[in-house]
Image (tube, rainbow, N blue to C red):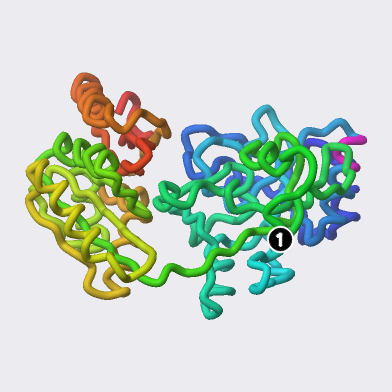
């Protein structure tokens, strides 16, 4: 075992049950949600408090041992991997919602709180936490801060950094500091903005002050079926060019349609070339007028059909399918490698054509399900790691 004396010291600090060193158990932490890159940690540590995080960091710093923080491991960038060796500080046992202030529209939570739990805690009061990454049922708020997570509703509401008011941090020397606060504006530099998205390289987040928004008065969610990806992607620019800003505007291609039908029996048309999922939210007045405008624009791009969610349950089912789309790929391929890029919306038809050309040239099946409204593409390359060259 590497660093035997150091691990003994950490076990004395935390207790044996909060230090994992068993090789079989460490395999769980060898990758994030993208298992192409792997790095097995020397040990995984589970603090319960900010003070324990600080003590761990001081011990590891004194020993010259590298370390990285980790949440649920749902990321796709390898930000939680101890590349080259090191310790993982898992924050998944710091799961308290410490304070909810509806009047001032904020909550204070620990980094291991699951993203969806925040909305669950305030929804009865008519509020919610806007960032909605597809992994929101499993991802932690600390991980969201580290990766500056987005989601389908980023188009209207922005990414994680737009909804974080303040942070408590443990610095690389173990010092505990706070940045930001409980109000929308605080004096000085925007250190919250600097730290959000830094993937744990500057500090370890131990508390997060999140901004709460009032739930929209109404939603209108529907999916639009096209015969081709070209028509669907050209509709995106058409909608925004007409001054229509949906809360979300997503696209799924035929490969994902096949996967979703297989996994969730969505009953999407099997011969569809592409589907746009469009959601409006806000005041109920005028919603039907907006819907008509959207249908009119879509019809100029050879739309086949428009289906509206007739109930909140149907809306939930539609979004569940979209957010679990990458999981559904498992019905078609044992492994996949997804990319994350951004292109101008007007270039979506060109980039999608190029992606399919690359797949055909190299005999790689590539699926596409992405945030069409802001040109944030996620080409998903399917392969089988058990077969060399596959």
Using the rendered view, name the quadrant where residue 193 is placed: top right
The answer to whether any part of residue 194 appears in the image is yes
Q: Position of residue 308 (x, y in %)?
A: 20, 65
Q: How many other residues sit within 10 Å of disc 1, few (<14), some (14-19) or many (≥20)?
A: many
Quarter holding the C terminus is: top left
The answer to whether any part of residue 45 appears in the image is no
Question: Element type at marker 1?
Answer: loop
Q: Is residue 80 magenta?
A: no
Using the rendered view, name the quadrant where residue 255 is placed: top left
> At 85% across and 43% down in the image, what residue appears?
57
Task: Give the magenta-colored segment's residue range.
Answer: 58-62
Q: Position of residue 317 (x, y in %)?
A: 30, 67
> At 37% across and 35% down in the image, what residue appears?
386
Q: Position of residue 92 (x, y in %)?
A: 66, 58
The residue nearer to you, when weighing 116 against 304, is: 304
Classify 21 as above or below 362.
below
The residue nearer to you, when weighing 342 against 262, is: 342
> At 85% across and 47% down in the image, what residue appears?
177
Q: Which residue is mark 1?
A: 110
């Amino acid at each position: 075992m590497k660093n035997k004396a150091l691990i003994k010291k950490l076990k004395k600090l935390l207790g044996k049950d909060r230090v994992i060193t068993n090789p079989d158990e460490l395999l769980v932490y060898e990758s994030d949600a993208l298992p192409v890159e792997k790095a097995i940690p020397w040990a995984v540590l589970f603090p319960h408090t900010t003070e324990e995080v600080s003590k761990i960091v001081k011990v590891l710093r004194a020993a010259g041992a590298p370390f990285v923080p980790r949440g649920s491991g749902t990321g796709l960038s390898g930000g939680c991997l101890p590349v080259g060796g090191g310790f993982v500080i898992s924050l998944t046992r710091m799961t308290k919602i410490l304070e909810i202030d509806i009047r001032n529209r904020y909550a204070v939570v620990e980094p291991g709180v699951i993203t969806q739990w925040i909305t669950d805690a305030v929804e009865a009061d008519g509020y919610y936490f806007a960032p909605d990454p597809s992994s929101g049922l499993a991802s932690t708020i600390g991980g969201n801060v580290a990766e500056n997570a987005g989601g389908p509703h980023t188009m209207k509401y922005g990414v994680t950094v737009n909804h974080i008011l303040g942070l408590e941090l443990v610095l690389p020397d173990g010092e505990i500091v706070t940045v930001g606060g409980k109000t929308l504006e605080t004096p000085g530099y925007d250190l919250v903005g600097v730290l959000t998205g830094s993937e744990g390289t500057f500090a370890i987040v131990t508390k997060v002050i999140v901004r709460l928004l009032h739930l929209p008065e109404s939603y209108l969610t529907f999916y639009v079926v096209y015969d081709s990806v070209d028509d669907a992607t050209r509709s995106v620019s058409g909608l925004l060019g007409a001054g229509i800003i949906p809360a979300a505007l997503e696209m799924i291609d035929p490969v994902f349609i096949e996967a979703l039908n297989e996994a969730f029996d969505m009953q999407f048309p099997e011969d569809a070339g592409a589907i746009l999922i469009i959601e409006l939210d806000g005041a109920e007045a005028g919603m039907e007028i907006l819907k008509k405008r959207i249908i009119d624009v879509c019809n100029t791009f050879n739309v086949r059909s428009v289906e509206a969610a007739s109930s909140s349950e149907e809306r939930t089912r539609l979004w569940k399918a979209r957010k679990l789309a990458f999981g559904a790929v498992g019905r078609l391929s044992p492994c996949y490698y997804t990319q994350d890029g951004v292109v101008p919306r007007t270039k979506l038809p060109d980039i999608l054509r190029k992606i399919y050309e690359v797949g055909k040239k190299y005999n790689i099946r590539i699926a596409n399900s992405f945030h069409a409204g802001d040109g944030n593409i996620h080409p998903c390359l399917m392969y089988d790691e058990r077969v060399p060259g596959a």
